[in-house]
Image: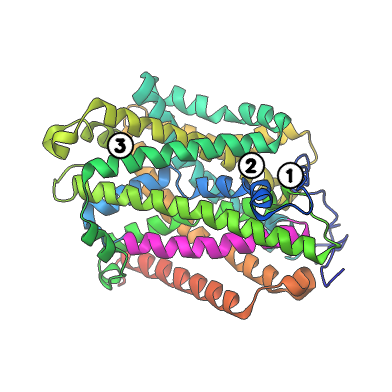
Amino acid sequence: MSGIDKIASTKNDSGLDQTSSKSLDEVNGSIVVPPNSGFWKTLMSYTGPGALIAVGYMDPGNWITSIAGGSQFKYKLLSVILISSLIAMLLQSMASRLGIVSGKDLAQLTRERTSKRTGIFLWIVAELAIMATDIAEIIGSGIALELIFNIPLIMGIIITAADVLLLLVLMKLGFRKIEAIVATLVTVILFVFLYEVILAKPSMNGILKGYVPTPQIFSNHSMLYLSLGIVGATVMPHDLYLGSSISQTRRVNREDRKDVAKALKFSTIDSNVQLFIAFIVNSLLLILGAALFFGTNSSLGRFVDLFNALNNKEIVGAIASPILSMLFAIALLSSGQSSTITGTLSGQIIMEGFIRLKMPLWAQRLLTRLLSVTPVLIFAIYYHGNEAKIENLLTFSQVFLSVALPFAIIPLVIFTSDKKIMGEFSNRKWVNYCAWFATIVLIGLNIYLILQTIGIM
């Protein structure tokens, strides 16, 4: 078996049987890769999961933190986006590697290899991360529907939450259909913001300098808070669970070392290319905020504010137009809808992996969706008519994701370093060093931020 472990039925110290079904069983191994194909044909066969992963890195939560970062600190936080994106590429390649080699996702392995108490704790953190993600995705989509069609926000949130029904239909049509739809939505987002940034005529010199880290990030509380928000919005905990699962949608012969190595190679290329697109989108968001709103003293804490500002000549000058505002809303809807599809899949993966629900797939998806959507809906109803309060949740939710991230990274690094699980495909030393360094730095920054917030530092 060329050193590749098949993880069979085992027991952890909770005494529970660890035999479990395949991750996303209905699509697991459903896509056949043509054998002996050329490079480009093989790459096309593996292209798709990366788009679903990249969506999580450019969801509506990124918009507020990135545009706010640009409007407040101009181009200085571009370095945070760059570093976050590099970390994301590293972690997502590790997540894909884990799924392809072991045949299990991160949630399944975490449950199998931890005690009952630890497993429950990590499950709760993962579920809270899904809820934090949904805050941005659902509110963003709901507001986009309000801006485009004048649908009340609460009704827009309910409509967005019902996308689980759409996902059920798409899964019946095949996983490639989901990948194609999400890739199309990503393309819409990319071209909308590329067009708007070109119109804004940013400073190229300022952009290049912005990718160089500045020590000011650590001494300025507001800058640090937004930086962690950007990290939380860029490196998403639920995407690590998702990546370890959907990498298994391609059929791989785990008895054949060459087949496994090929799957790892092309899955990594797909992931990195799509995450590079996400990096471009996030950079465009911050550049747009810097080019149009830095120094204007405009209140840009809400999507509605951004929508109105793009149509206000007093703020953005001669390029202001209703078309610019409408394109922004369309991109917001595209981002929200694509993110909620992948968020629902992640919720199912986490629920199945940690607690192994035994119920029909439609019921599983409905339950996982309700668990994540209900808190958002309650908050929206409670603060009905006060959209500022509702949208204030967004930046906080992204900071929480940054706090939750180490609880997904640490098991991922441990499992991908374990030769009993990964065999010859375990992490190289430099990968381990980089992953642990990123985790330690992130934990340190979170502690520093918390201490600053409560006034100790």
Mark number, residue 345? 2
Mark pair 2, 1: CA separation? 8 Å
The C terminus sits in image quarter: bottom left
- The residue tagged with tag 1: helix, strand or loop? loop
Within the magenta stretch, is there residue 147? no
Q: Position of residue 33 (x, y in %)?
A: 75, 48
The majority secondary structure of the magenta stretch comes to helix
Quadrant, the N terminus:
bottom right
Amino acid carrying mark 3 in the image: Ala
Asked whether, in this view, residue 178 is left or right of residue 57, the answer is right
Instruction: Decide: few, some or many residues near mark 2? Use Cα within 10 Å; few <14, some 14-19, many ≥20.
Output: many
Q: Amino acid at mark 2?
A: Leu
Residue found at the far front of this picture: 38
Q: Which mark is residue 388?
A: 3
Residue at 63% x, 26% y is 165
**Quadrant hosting residue 61:** top left
Helix, strand or loop under label 2 = helix
199 w.r.t. 251: above or below: above
Q: Marks 3 and 2: CB-CB under 8 Å?
A: no
Q: CA distance from mark 3 to mark 2?
A: 29 Å
Asked if disc 1 and disc 3 are in contact, CB closer than 8 Å, the reply is: no
Of badges 3 and 2, nearer the viewer stands 2
- Camera sees residue 400: no
**Foreground: 442 or 120?**
442
- Asked which secondary structure carries label 3, the reply is helix
Q: Residue at x 39, y 44 (%)?
A: 393
Q: Which residue is mark 1?
A: 24
Give the residues drawn in magenta, as a range: 78-104
Discs 2, 1 touching: Cβ within 8 Å: yes
Mark closer to the chain start, 2 or 1? 1
- Residue 100 included in the magenta stretch of the image: yes
